[in-house]
Amino acid sequence: DAGVIQSPRHEVTEMGQEVTLRCKPISGHDYLFWYRQTMMRGLELLIYFNNNVPIDDSGMPEDRFSAKMPNASFSTLKIQPSEPRDSAVYFCASSLDRDGYTFGSGTRLTVV
Amino acid sequence: AQTVTQSQPEMSVQEAETVTLSCTYDTSESDYYLFWYKQPPSRQMILVIRQEAYKQQNATENRFSVNFQKAAKSFSLKISDSQLGDAAMYFCAYRRGVDKIIFGKGTRLHILP
């Protein structure tokens, strides 16, 4: 298995632009998580899905953020419009039931 | 609410020596899982070791072992024979059943040659 695949690995965009981050979880995993990592706040859970259904989106900072999981093999995290304070590393992770997560390599987002 | 506390922001250890990273957590649950993750400079998050709360035996993975004290809500990580490749940020983490994982703030480990 190729693991959790995230794209792009790096993204630089201008303030106000729309940004879409993509994630392909490990086949067969029924949980998918989106985290954001910054120096100041550490790892923050944004949202997670179980069997493609959003379970907890209380960590999504504001309406500018949205996440979808149209099928078991694909998820997106969208920021529209982006702001400089959204600059961070965004991780996608998947797991099977109670196991630990397998993380993707992360997307480093820079909003200028 | 569950919390995970890592009281050592940074630690250093001489190559080939043993080092222990501390972690405490707060929960009222009896069924949960604890993890240690490693994040090297490449930023990849790597699962190092996993412990089920119902198991009394401490988990071990090669040079990595844990000291799980359920009553004290303590979960420390011991790295034996430290190697340069062990230099990384280490995160202690807690998961209640199939719920989300809660991470500590991390401990940065330096390996001195």
Image (cartoon, rainbow, N blue to C red):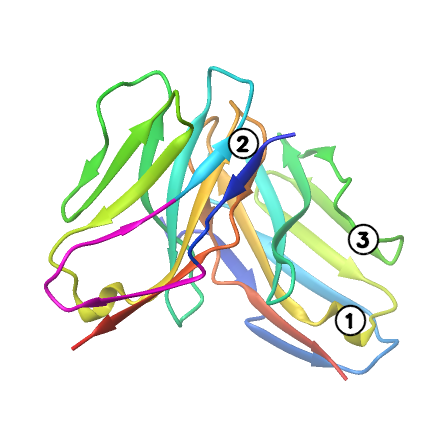
The answer to which quarter of the image holds residue B101 is top right
**Residue A61, label in figure:** 3
Q: Nearer the viewer, residue B9 or A30?
A: B9
Query: What's the magenta region?
Result: B9-22
Instruction: Tell me if B83 is positioned left or right of A50 in this view.
Output: left
Which of the two discs, 2 and 3, labels the residue nearer the N terminus?
A: 2
Which of the two discs, 2 and 1, labels the residue nearer the N terminus?
A: 2
The picture places residue B34, in percent across and down from the top left corner, at 41, 33
Give the labeled residue for mark 1. A85
The picture places residue A4, in percent across and down from the top left corner, at 47, 52
Is residue B4 visible to the viewer in this orientation of the structure?
yes
Crowdedness of circle 2 by 10 Å Cα count: few (<14), some, many (20+)? some
Q: Is residue B20 magenta?
A: yes
The answer to which quarter of the image holds residue A8 is bottom right
Protein chain holding label 1: A
Residue shown at 31%/30% (left/top)? B68
Up/down of B1 relative to B36, above or below: above
Residue shown at 80%/51% (left/top)? A66
Which amino acid type is shown beneath numbered disc 3? Pro
Is residue A27 visible to the viewer in this orientation of the structure?
no
Residue shown at 76%/40% (left/top)? A57
Give the labeled residue for mark 2. A30
Which amino acid type is shown beneath numbered disc 2? Asp
Up/down of A81 relative to B49, above or below: below
Which amino acid type is shown beneath numbered disc 1? Arg
Q: Nearer the viewer, residue B5 or A39?
A: B5
Protein chain holding label 3: A
Screen quadrant of the C terminus of chain A: bottom right
